[in-house]
């Protein structure tokens, strides 16, 4: 299974990020979960792979984590093969533009959360 979650919080320092990822790696390894955490230090896009019940348990923990200002699963689907097989949790600080773009698409972040991107996006597709 693969799922993505997204959260927004105060910018995290390198030290706090390393601590977070270190703890998460330990948990993920114990539960045979692999994945990547893409971040610009305040918005996080998480891709997680693993058995459905393990992912469900992690999603519950993530949704209860008070460090998240917003958390939601934005996609979930079965995959035939893991993409992050070698990583209990890879930290990716390079795709900041993608992280911000995904945040804007799902209306999370600094912008107006009520802005309807669905309407303008589908019009563009039709045109
Ligand atoms: C942005 C973010 C990403 C996280 N990613 C994971 C993760 O991949 N795996 C994990 O076990 N915990 C992750 N955590 C931490 C969990 O929310 C939770 O604090 C942690 O699993 C500790 O759980 P415990 O109380 O059972 O020890 C993340 C937290 C944040 C803020």
Image (spheres, rainbow, N blue to C red):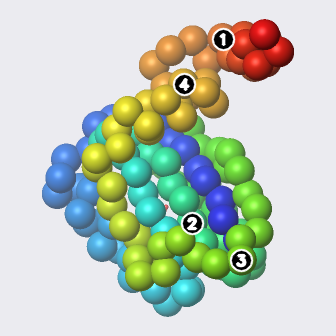
Residue picked out by circle 1: 115
Q: Is residue 39 or residue 127 the one in the foreground?
A: 127
Residue 88 x %, y %: 43, 78
The crowding category of the residue bearing disc 2, from other C-alpha atoms within 10 Å (few below 14, some 14 to 19, many at least 20), is many
Q: Is residue 31 above or below residue 18?
A: below
Which circle marks residue 104 in the picture?
Answer: 4
Marks 4 and 1, the one that precedes in the sequence: 4
Furthest-front residue in view? 127
Evaluate whether residue 112 shows in this view.
yes
Report helix, strand or loop for mark 4.
helix
Marks 4 and 3, the one that precedes in the sequence: 3
Marks 3 and 1, the one that precedes in the sequence: 3
Image depth: mark 4 or mark 3 in front: 3
Indicate left or right for 33 with 115 as reference: left
The crowding category of the residue bearing disc 4, from other C-alpha atoms within 10 Å (few below 14, some 14 to 19, many at least 20), is some
Report helix, strand or loop for mark 3.
loop
Marks 4 and 2, the one that precedes in the sequence: 2
The yes-or-no answer for disc 2 within 8 Å of ligand 1 is: yes
Image depth: mark 2 or mark 3 in front: 3
Q: Residue at x 78, y 10 (%)?
A: 127
Residue 111 x %, y %: 50, 15
Indicate left or right for 63 with 124 as reference: left
Measure the C-alpha gap from mark 2 to mark 3: 14 Å
Measure the C-alpha gap from mark 3 to mark 1: 35 Å
Q: Is residue 17 or residue 118 the one in the foreground?
A: 118
Furthest-right residue in view? 126
The image quarter containing residue 48 is bottom right
Q: Is mark 4 in CB contact (under 8 Å) with mark 2?
A: no
Which circle marks residue 48 in the picture?
Answer: 2
Q: Is mark 2 in CB contact (under 8 Å) with mark 3?
A: no
Q: Quadrant of the N terminus?
A: bottom right
Residue picked out by circle 3: 80
């Amino acid at each position: 299974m693969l799922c993505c979650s997204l959260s927004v919080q105060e910018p995290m320092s390198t030290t706090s990020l390393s601590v977070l990822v270190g703890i998460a790696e330990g948990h993920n390894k114990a539960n045979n979960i692999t994945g990547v955490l893409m971040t610009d230090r305040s918005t996080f896009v998480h891709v997680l792979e693993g058995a459905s019940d393990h992912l469900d348990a992690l999603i519950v923990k993530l949704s209860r984590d008070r460090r998240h200002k917003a958390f939601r699963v934005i996609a979930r689907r079965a995959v035939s093969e893991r993409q992050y097989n070698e990583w209990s949790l890879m930290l990716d600080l390079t795709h900041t533009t993608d992280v911000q773009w995904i945040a804007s698409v799902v209306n999370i972040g600094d912008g107006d959360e009520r802005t309807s991107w669905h309407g303008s996006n589908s019009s563009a597709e039709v045109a």
